[in-house]
Image: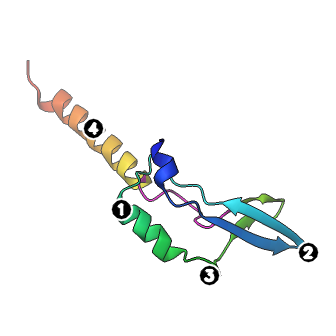
Amino acid sequence: MDGDEMLPHIVFSFIIGGQTYRQTLEYPAGASPMPELVHHYLEKYPLNAPVQVHYDPADPQRATLEPGAAPGDWFIVATGLAIALFALLALLFGGT
């Protein structure tokens, strides 16, 4: 079984201009089905609860419950900056 299959299957629907759309919540890349993450999403989106949907007015089929950067995106940027800083310091002070 793939790890993504162990994450909750969250489906949401919304109506725009009299037309009903249904979408499935897409998890951030690399999301791991740890019990804490599963519990977080089930608590955040309880069954049949109203949710705020963010959609593209030009293409309502492009919709999500969680717009913006994924929660772990800052870590990728911070790691890249740390590596670049380490390399710069190694070049400046790594006397040979």
Give the quadrant of residue 79: top left
Q: Residue furthest right?
A: 18
CA–CA distance between discs 4 and 3? 43 Å
- Amino acid under disc 2: Gly
Magenta region, main secondary structure? loop
Give the quadrant of residue 58: bottom right
- Amino acid under disc 3: Ala
Give the quadrant of residue 9: bottom right
Q: Dot 2 corresponds to which residue?
A: 18
Q: How many marks?
A: 4
CA–CA distance between discs 4 and 1? 31 Å
Q: Dot 3 corresponds to which residue?
A: 49
Counting residues from the start of the chain, the first of labels 4 and 1 encountered is 1
85, 8: nearer the viewer: 8
Counting residues from the start of the chain, the first of labels 4 and 2 encountered is 2
Using the rendered image of the protein, determine whether residue 51 is visible from the camera's viewpoint.
yes
